[in-house]
Amino acid sequence: MLRKTSLISVTVFFLVLLLGTYWNHLNQALFVKEQASLLRDVINTQATAIERLLNQTLLSTQMMAHEVRRSGGEPEDFPRRAEEILRDFPAVSSLQLVPAGVIRQIYPLPGNEAAMGLHLFNYPLASGPAKRARQDGVLTLNGPLELVQGGMGVVGYNPVFLHRGDGGESFWGFVSAVIDLERLLSVTDLEVLAGNGYFYELVRPDSDGVEYLVTAGGTREHPGTVQMLDVQVPNGRWILRMGRDLDEGYPGFLFGVLVSCMVALLIAWLVHYVLREPQRLRALVDSRTHELHQLAYHDFLTGLVNRRLLQEELEQALREQLRSGGPLALLYLDLDDFKRINDSMGHEVGDQLLVAVARRLRSQVRANDIVARLGGDEFAVVLLDSGSGEDLLRLAEKLINAIRQPVKLQNRELVISTSIGITVAPADGETASQLSRNADLALYASKRRGKNCIAFFDPAMQQEASRLMQLEEELRGALAGQQLELAYQPIVELTQGRPVAHEALIRWNHPRHGWLPPSEFIPAAEQSGLIVPLGYWVLEAVCAMLAASDAQGREPLPVAVNISPQQFRDKRFLKEVGRILKHSGAPPALLELEITETTLMDNLDATATILDELQRMGLRISIDDFGTGYSSLALLKQLPVDTLKIDRCFVHDLETEEGDRQIIQAVVAMAAKLDLDVIAEGVESEAQRQWLLAFGCRCGQGYLFGRPEIAARPHSGVGVTA
């Protein structure tokens, strides 16, 4: 019996030891896998941070390059402009102007005198990257290298090409920036990671396979798995390698075996362990399965249900609704002007704002309601047992109020608004696809009404969508069938009411419906892309009228023409404007192009180039709807603009809203400092005119002075009001 007991004990001991050893092996493998996954996430994050910081820092060369191009190669007051730029880029130790490859100007100069007169194409450490930057025509990074003025640094060479008279471009030279790499990388987490057991190496490979060390940190005693990732730098690449001492995080295999031996001696704990191990493994599988389900059916950024799962849960909710008989509502939400925040502050801030919006949506609905992110800045909410229309309206207003509360990001308070479209089952539809389509139509109707608006689905919306499609087809025929006319609204001098210019507004003489205002057909034109040929038609008609008046010896007043965002971004825009002016013979000084503020804020460099070319043609530039696009004083200083048109939304409540009065006063004062003309839109009362005069605004436009009139020539004063 003793022998049998001993044999069983020994057998159990070795069995438990074997199981314990296997368990220890699994845990060690899992630990290594988790560490590798963590290292992959860390190196991705750090590589992205380095790329972003380099690109942001090298914006300093692009801003100065813009000044060089704008001044034709002779920038005025380089030290003052360089000082302004360097305030925003602390990692840049100096900016240099390098015409023809020779360093001529440096800011700040003290300490950098040795670099003055250096010829980059002849300097061995700089000639290769400099020649490549000139040949490729793109910003190129060089370094790290030993600087002539002393010390090590990274230098960005931004080639500058100037337009020649024959339409080509000639190489002017470089705008270069010397970057303090230690200061640049200090805002990353590399040093913190080095203190936590990680090591890193940032190297620059050359074409011969030789690697030059950029920076390094941490120790490599027992690195375990080492991962590397390319860091894309301007016109080149670096390599980031990272690893970690695995001995710091895991107690070791032998220690685990020792623990297993001790456990084997405790039979009671052994039984508990044997019973618990399968359960632990099942929990691990369930956890991994749940993670995969989350990735497949939930939005990775906000954690909300994604579009795929929304459709499934909406179908399930509809089936339950049919059994219970209660109402169900689907809400589509779209953030207003979210693209503006993304473009001006970056996608990282935009993502943080989306997370904040998702959190607020979730907090405003019940636990069993469904909140989803459809993609971009679009969200959806499924309300089970949604109640009456009044209940839905109150909830929608509650959501709007919650979203538009300020969000503090990067030491700034951002305010975002939203538009909401609502559809209800079973009244509006009984399937998920029907409700989704209806909610989308309601959202579109809400967006058309403005910001912070709510729209319930109505069957007429489907008819409206069909009508817009029909209108699009008829509009194509109208462009070729001479059904379009121009109406002119006067822009007057506020003191005497004397017209000083006109704005050209398009009207459609529809064969069946008569005269149609732009609000009836412009949305269809924008959706279909017809707004571009429509805009060129307006330009041709206005230029033909101005040329005819000039040829007959009359002195027509200047005419303003609206340019749509799609037309402004058209690749043929400058060429078409030049062709129309040349073909018509119209005096360019009498034509003013009105471009919305939000359009100008997209791609500042490209916008400035287009506006410079338009000014060279002799045209005047006006910013339309000013005050709604959040442009800054710095933007106005960089763009060749002649006129600001204050949006009618600020004029409408001028008599009662102190905030609107303050905005108009600020715009007028700012325009006076910048020597810009100001026109107030939407002036409809004598009281509004008096307020504007008191603020110093000299010109206005609105029904108080005259409605748009269809006429062959706006100065004739004869026409049909439309």
Image (cartoon, helix red, strand yellow):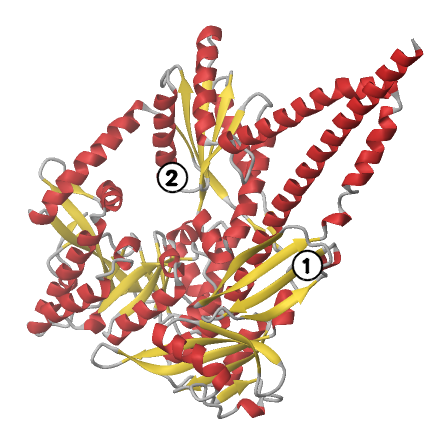
x and y percentages locating residue 65 in the rendered image? 42, 76
Q: Nearer the viewer, residue 504 or 47?
A: 47
Is residue 180 visible to the viewer in this orientation of the structure?
yes
Q: Residue sitting at 48 percent across and 67 percent down?
A: 633
In terms of secondary structure, where does tag 1 sit?
strand
Q: Is 163 drawn above or below residue 119 in the view shown?
A: above
In terms of secondary structure, where does tag 2 sit?
helix
Q: Which of 402 and 372 is in front in this view?
A: 372
Horizontal side of 448 relative to 118 (left or right) equals: left
Horizontal side of 125 relative to 711 (left or right) equals: right
Horizontal side of 511 relative to 343 (left or right) equals: left
Q: Is 241 drawn above or below residue 615 in the view shown?
A: above
Q: Nearer the viewer, residue 545 or 74?
A: 74
User: Which residue occupies the extreme right position in the image?
Assistant: 2
Q: Residue sitting at 32 percent across and 65 percent down?
A: 622
Q: In which quarter of the image is the N terminus?
A: top right
User: Can you tell which quarter of the image residue 602 is in?
Assistant: bottom left
x and y percentages locating residue 497 in the rendered image? 29, 64
Q: Is 72 drawn above or below residue 581 in the view shown?
A: below
User: Can you tell which quarter of the image residue 592 is in?
Assistant: bottom left
Q: Residue sitting at 39 percent across and 83 percent down?
A: 173
Q: Are marks 2 and 1 in contact (CB under 8 Å)?
A: no
Is residue 654 visible to the viewer in this orientation of the structure?
no
Residue at which label 2 appears: 447
Residue at which label 1 appears: 199
x and y percentages locating residue 595 in the rendered image? 32, 60
- Kindly identify the amino acid type of the residue bearing the numbered disc 1: Phe
Q: Is 671 drawn above or below residue 519 in the view shown?
A: below
